[in-house]
Image: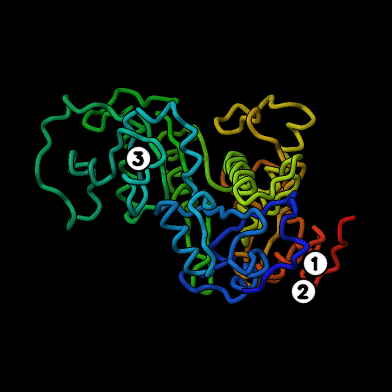
Amino acid sequence: VSACPPHIQGRKIPFGLMFDIDGVLVRGKKVLSYALEAFSLLVDSNKNFLVPTVFVTNAGNTLRHQKAESLSSWLNVPINADQVIMSHSPLRLYREFHNKKVLITGQGPVKEVAANVGFNNVVTVDDLRSSFPLLDAVDQRRRIRAPCNFGEYYTPIEGVVLFGDPVRWETCLQLIIDILMTDGKPYKGLKSIPYPHLPIIACNMDLHWMAEAPLPRFGHGAFMVCLESLYKKITGKDLIYTALVGKPSEVTFHYAAKMVTRQAERIGVLPKGGIQRLYVIGDNVNTDVFGGNLYNQYVMNVKTQGNNGYEQPGLEVEDFQLPDHCYSILVETGVYGDHSVDSHSHSPRDFVTLSERLRKPSFITENVLRAVELVLHRECLDLGISMRSNVDCCS
């Protein structure tokens, strides 16, 4: 592992890095060769981080400490769980829902994930289909024949939380819409469809993500498109999300920015003026670039106009010094590349109306190594590396 030059050690660092994972550091379980060299530039000879660094992923099918263990193994650098922001991490801030009975969807240890972010009374899709076997009718081989006769004693469901893409889309789509159309009482029909419907929170809005396959794979955003379309077709009304977390939402990047500051404090490099610049490094125009630029717009607005209009939980600024700027760096090793078929319509439904300019990255680089080199050059941390960009060094 390369050690940073002595003049960097002990220096206060006024910037931080936010890395996407899939398509930037790995493709599926294959570590991209550029990633190891990139991270050798960010640590000392003992593999301690010299630059405050976090990982912001829209994955939601595992716990932070498990993802940190995977990253540590992939990058050959110790990664702390506090450096990992999952799509569901900001849900810790939505305390008003933590004691409500909610239906949760996704895959992996969803009950453990839900408990980890504060939810105390959860029902999975499998729980619901076991309680009401007549609801899941598409796959006849999976039908449960046992009758249900305790409906009137069943405590209504009070909300829905979408952690990530489920395995059986047809089952989840049917049961979620059942819950929304029956006001949480799937054992009975209603004379009219309630609207507004029960609260629904969604994590991870990625339409696509990059694995080992030559073309991008469907993400949770694709499932959300199906849910939105079916609800609209059946009810004639728009599905309303109470909250959207994960990239590209401001709350996720704000949460990540706080984690960058904590990381800077932990490794002893936080300046008195706080973290001034953030760099978001990702492969997806509609999540990483869009989200980084959207957060930059939020920062600019709050600094000039105050926090008016930003009432979503998690966007409080009283206990946190905002950065001055958030830059987006697009790498060409994932969703964005020569094979890419991209358009503004690929953005999440509730973000499509926002400005097209938010999809324009501050910089484009071949890979994550070039992105890290670019940042270090701009910040005047000259590591003697061979630069392939013409970015001017800061004064």
Q: Amino acid at mark 3?
A: Ala
Discs 2, 1 touching: Cβ within 8 Å: yes
Residue 343 appears anywhere in the view:
no
Q: Which residue is mark 1?
A: 382
Element type at mark 2: loop
Between disc 3 and disc 1, the foreground one is: 1
In this picture, is 324 found above or below 68? above
Percent across and percent down for residue 244 are 52, 39
Whether residue 330 can be seen here: yes
Q: Which residue is mark 2?
A: 385
- Residue 110 place in picture, x, y as percent: 34, 47
Which residue shows up at 90% across the image and 55% down it? 395
Q: Nearer the viewer, residue 33 or 286?
A: 33
Q: Measure how far apart labels 3 and 1 are at the Cα level.
A: 44 Å
Coloring applied to the structure: rainbow
Mark nearer the viewer, 3 or 2: 2
Disc number placed over residue 115 in the picture, else none:
3
Choose the circle earlier in sequence order: 3 or 2.
Answer: 3
Label 3, residues with CA under 10 Å away: few <14, some 14-19, many ≥20: some
Q: Would you say 328 lies left or right of 175 here?
A: right
Amino acid at pointer 2: Ile
